[in-house]
């Protein structure tokens, strides 16, 4: 009988101990958790030159990539704890809210609609939606897209905005910019529309393409965080780091390095 009581007591203590552990874990905010575990899970779109892309040495680089490395150095004294996880515009919010990643830095515009389901840092970059066409195209502005095939990447602001720019455009949705550009080169679509800096990354591949002069939106990029209590300290720390980098000229330096300074 005594032995049975002992066993029950041990099981009771064990269950309570496990319970406490998970409660403690729940109460630890994300900033502390990243510091303790030494793992910072960062979602990036590795297919959005010059913000994040694989270079000729097979390494991930770009404006967003370097910016988050700088932030990590400021917050955690190192960028070696970052694990970059691929996201696309259509799955990045799901990746964030399902806790696959701690934050998303991915040319992501702060919008009212997105603010309902995620939180954002202060803006770190400004751009606008533009249109890419062939150099000899007769498309000269947004309204010329009516009746024409326009490529957009699913889940982007362009996918929504394009309906206001040209309500009769034939919209072709792609998973990423590479696929859209392939179809554009084959002549299967007449234009691609997204932020001008992203189009700039595509257009530099050849002088056969041009970006039309009009801009159809103002897009402020922010770092997306989960909309919960546990992400608040991380958000404050990221905002402080962005502020320091803005004042020190570090953000401008990165803009020059990746040739994206012309829109700020
Ligand atoms: N900035 C736009 C957006 O957040 C388009 C860029 C992109 O993420 O591909 O939807």
Image: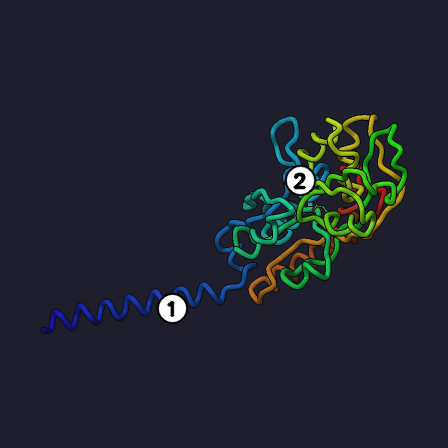
Task: Quadrant for residue 20, please give it.
Answer: bottom left
Q: Is residue 174 left or right of residue 146?
A: left
- The answer to whether the residue bearing label 1 lies less than 8 angstroms from the nearest atom of ligand 1 is no
Query: Is 58 rendered above or below residue 103?
Result: above
Looking at the image, which residue is at 79% across and 43% down? 169
Please state which of residues 61 and 132 is positioned toward the viewer in this rendering: 132
- Label count reads 2
Looking at the image, which residue is at 79% across and 34% down? 190
Looking at the image, which residue is at 75% across and 55% down? 123
Task: Residue 98: give x, y in percent of width and height.
Answer: 52, 55
Residue to which mark 2 is pinned: 174
Task: Residue 89: give x, y in percent of width and height.
Answer: 65, 47
Q: Is residue 203 left or right of residue 102?
A: right
User: Which numbered dot is residue 118?
Assistant: none
Q: CA distance from mark 1 to mark 2?
A: 47 Å
Residue to which mark 1 is pinned: 20
**Closer to the eye: label 1 or 2:** 2
The single residue placed furthest to the left in the displayed view is 1
Q: Circle 2 — which element? A: strand
Which badge, 1 or 2, is on the more N-terminal residue?
1
Image quadrant containing the N terminus: bottom left
Task: Residue 159: give x, y in percent of width and height.
Answer: 72, 48
């Amino acid at each position: 009988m005594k032995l049975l009581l002992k066993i029950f007591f041990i099981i009771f203590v064990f269950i309570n101990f496990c319970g406490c552990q998970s409660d403690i874990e729940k109460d630890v905010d994300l900033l502390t958790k990243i510091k303790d575990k030494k793992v910072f899970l960062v979602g990036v779109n590795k297919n959005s030159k010059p913000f994040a892309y694989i270079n000729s040495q097979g390494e991930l680089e770009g404006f967003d990539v370097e910016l988050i490395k700088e932030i990590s150095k400021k917050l955690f004294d190192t960028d070696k704890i970052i694990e970059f996880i691929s996201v696309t515009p259509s799955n990045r919010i799901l990746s964030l809210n399902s806790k696959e990643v701690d934050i998303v830095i991915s040319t992501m515009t702060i919008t009212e609609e997105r603010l309902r389901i995620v939180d954002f840092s202060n803006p770190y970059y400004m751009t606008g939606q533009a249109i890419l066409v062939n150099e000899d195209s007769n498309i000269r502005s947004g309204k010329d897209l009516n009746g024409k095939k326009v490529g957009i990447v699913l889940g982007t602001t362009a996918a929504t905005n394009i309906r206001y720019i040209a309500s009769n455009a034939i919209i072709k949705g792609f998973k990423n910019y590479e696929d859209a550009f392939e179809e554009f080169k084959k002549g299967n679509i007449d234009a691609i529309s997204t932020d001008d800096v992203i189009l700039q990354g595509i257009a530099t591949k050849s002088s056969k393409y041009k970006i039309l002069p009009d801009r159809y939106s103002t897009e402020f990029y922010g770092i997306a965080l989960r909309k919960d209590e546990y992400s608040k300290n991380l958000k404050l720390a990221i905002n402080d780091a962005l502020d320091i980098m803005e004042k020190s000229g570090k953000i401008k330096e990165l803009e020059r390095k990746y040739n994206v300074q012309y829109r700020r």
